[in-house]
Amino acid sequence: MGKSIPQYLGQLDICKSVVSLATGAGAIYLLYKAIKAGIKCKPPLCSNSPICIARECPVPGERALPQEAPAPEASAVGGPKGLAVERERHGRDSGELRRLLNSLECKQDEYAKSMILHSITRCVYLLEAEASACTTDDIVLVGYMLDDRDNSVKTQALNTLKAFSGIRKFRLKIQEHAIKVLELISTIWDTELHVAGLRLLNNLPLPDYVHPQLRRVMPALMEILQSDYILAQVQAIRLLSYLAQKNDLLYDILNCQVHSNFLSLFQPTQPGSILYEVLVFAERLSEGRNAPHYRAVKWHYNEQSLHESLFGEESRLADRLLALVIHPEEDVQIQACKVIVSLQYPQDLRARSSTCQSSRSYFKNTE
């Protein structure tokens, strides 16, 4: 043949390079065809599935804009005019909230229901006009989800009711679910559910007919207060502080059993949010028990009650308050002083322990 072995090997390398280039070019061409086909492919018609309220909202029945279409024209505030929030700002109903509520009526699995409820909650907060246009039937539909077997669905339903409770015309209807919410809080130990349920209750005026149920769930509320989950603790303290102002519930709160280390909630190492709320709670309890109508009755408390922990003969509350007077957060300092003042009123109370008497005289001298 007249060619040496190195020459043959060189030709073989050249062939391999050509084949490799051809293969690479073919792959790139196929990739280009696939991308082009995907761009030209029209998305399906809008459905009732959960969707982000910040996306382009076409008129019902229209297709969403294809990817190659130009971006929506920017509005004066810098956002696209097609956003659901922007549509409402310009006086147009995006229909987003109504589509989500309609989809909730369809048979969905637990995950889908949870996501739909989450999207409804966001819509209620962001699309005020559409939320106000809803009806009490929509509240009933959301309330029905409180009976779902999945805790995440219950939690999202509570969040949605909390969002709707900001609209005055729905509050009475949402109040009807208060007993159910208390039942969930007291029977299911789920921190996220506790936070959602307590936030809802703290956003509602609780009618008197709920008080019997509140008495039954008082131990559960006290357990949440003494848990290690700060968000749930804060919400539980706020609810109990509100209930402490109810004359017919004050004794039930004071006689509720607490852990032996309850006063650890007053330690300076606690988060400021906890300290402030628990000091407000203590102030209201102190004022309530010193009210003339409450003092007119001789009450009996069990040895492990909240009353004995805070105001009993062996209570160390005075020592904790002294430590909080010099707390770095000013709100905590001021609230600790308010509790100290409430403990000194009225002056004709003489059934204090020697510890409380000495602490009272110390407070007077420092003043």
Image (cartoon, grey):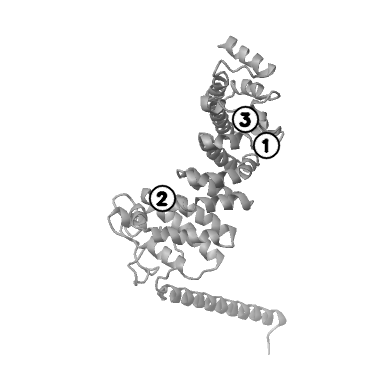
Amino acid carrying label 1: it is Val
State the quadrant of the C terminus: top right
**SS class of the residue under badge 2?**
helix
Assign a secondary structure to mark 1. Answer: loop
Residue at which label 2 appears: 172
Q: Residue at x 34, y 66 (%)?
A: 58
Amino acid found under the numbered disc labelled 3:
Trp
- In the image shown, does 300 or 289 lie closer to the viewer? 300
Quadrant where the image shows the N terminus: bottom right
Using the rendered view, name the quadrant where residue 22 is placed: bottom right
Sequence-first tag of 1 and 3 = 1
Answer few, some or many: residues within 10 Å of disc 1's Cα (few below 14, many 20 plus, some between 14 and 19): many
Q: Secondary structure at mark 3?
A: loop
For marks 2 and 3 on the same chain, the one whose residue lies earlier in the sequence: 2
Q: Residue furthest top?
A: 365
User: Residue 45's image quarter?
Assistant: bottom left
Q: Residues within 10 Å of mark 3 (few under 14, many from 20)?
A: few
Disc number for residue 226 = none
Residue plotted at (56% across, 25% down): 295
Q: Is residue 299 left or right of residue 86?
A: right
Q: Is residue 193 above or below residue 145?
A: above
As drawn, the label of residue 299 is: 3
| Amino acid carrying mark 2 in the image | Leu
Residue 270 position, x and y percent, is 63, 32
On the image, the x and y values in percent for residue 155 come to 54, 55
Q: CA distance from mark 2 to mark 3?
A: 35 Å
Query: Disc 1 designates what residue?
Result: 258
Residue at position x 48%, y 76% from top? 34
Residues at discs 2 and 3 in contact (Cβ within 8 Å): no
